[in-house]
Image: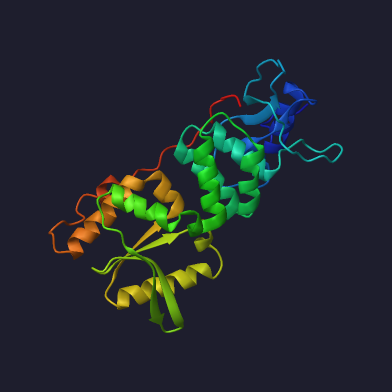
Amino acid sequence: MHTGDLSPLARRWRAVWEVGERIAVIDGASALHHRGLKGFTTEGIHVSIPHTATPHAVEGVVQHKVRRPSPRTAAPGALPVATPGPAAVRAAHWARSDREAALILVLPVQQRLVTGDQLLSATTSVQGRTRRKFIRTIAADIALGAQALGELDFARICRRHALPEPDRQVVRQGPRGRIYLDVRWACGLVVEIDGAGHRWGLAVSEDNLRRNSGTLSGDLVLQIDTVGLRLFEATFMEQVVAAHRLLMGEGQHADDSSARIPSPEGRGAVGGATQ
């Protein structure tokens, strides 16, 4: 008889057996954990079940009723686990906040559990009840990078914060050839807008070269990631406005904008909202 703590795999099998082998699928963040996700924690094992099922409550298991079952591993005898794309989208629907939803969408792509295109495709097949538009927007930001934030979108954001429209895709000559700056004002303020792909491979080096070139030419370079702009637009744009005023000689220093940087919030059990 086993009397010690169950392993993560054993806990997942227990969740399936006690909820019902024919109806339960390890889903959401728990499915991603099964495939090796790091940096995101939840309490309990999350399973999806058909919306017509009436199972009994199981301690340590969060059950989510869904109308359309997630694609799953189908090997005989294998643990029924949702595939990463749909699992990430479901986890985002089940998250407690937009910040937590964005995190559970970004991490699986960064950790190579799913591609950005697969994640974006899953937003059309998984129809949750919460934050549908937000999830589609973040998935597009992750899959398409800075391209997802169009030039008109950023111009609209600038107007919303009483900033003049900047020049976009300004061409500079760098030591390795032409360099394209995402956004630049005539006063010398540059904003580089990074997508999720900017953290991978040689993109980091290319970004650093572009940013350093701008700094050496006398520009003040601010960096904003697309997902961060969706979540913390007010805080990021406070910094942009402060920098613009400073360079325009209006005497506005970025003295308190950095003090309002959102603090990380704890990550615990995702609520059992139905889908």
Above/below status of 216 relative to 192: below
Front one among 13 and 190:
190
Residue 240 position, x and y percent, is 28, 56
Assign the N terminus to one quadrant of the image: top right
Front one among 201 and 118:
118
Above/below status of 272 relative to 231: above
Please say whether residue 139 is visible from this viewpoint.
Answer: yes
Q: Residue at x 12, y 59 (%)?
A: 251
Residue 258 position, x and y percent, is 27, 51
Above/below status of 132 relative to 159: above
Q: Is residue 103 left or right of residue 165?
A: right
Residue 107 position, x and y percent, is 55, 49
Residue 187 position, x and y percent, is 23, 68
Outermost residue on the right side: it is 76
Q: Is residue 262 left or right of residue 73?
A: left
Please say whether residue 115 is visible from this viewpoint.
Answer: no
Which color mode does the image show? rainbow
Count of marks, rendered view:
0
Q: Residue at x 49, y 67 (%)?
A: 204
Q: Is residue 43 left or right of residue 149?
A: right
Q: Residue at x 54, y 43 (%)?
A: 136
Above/below status of 40 relative to 60: below
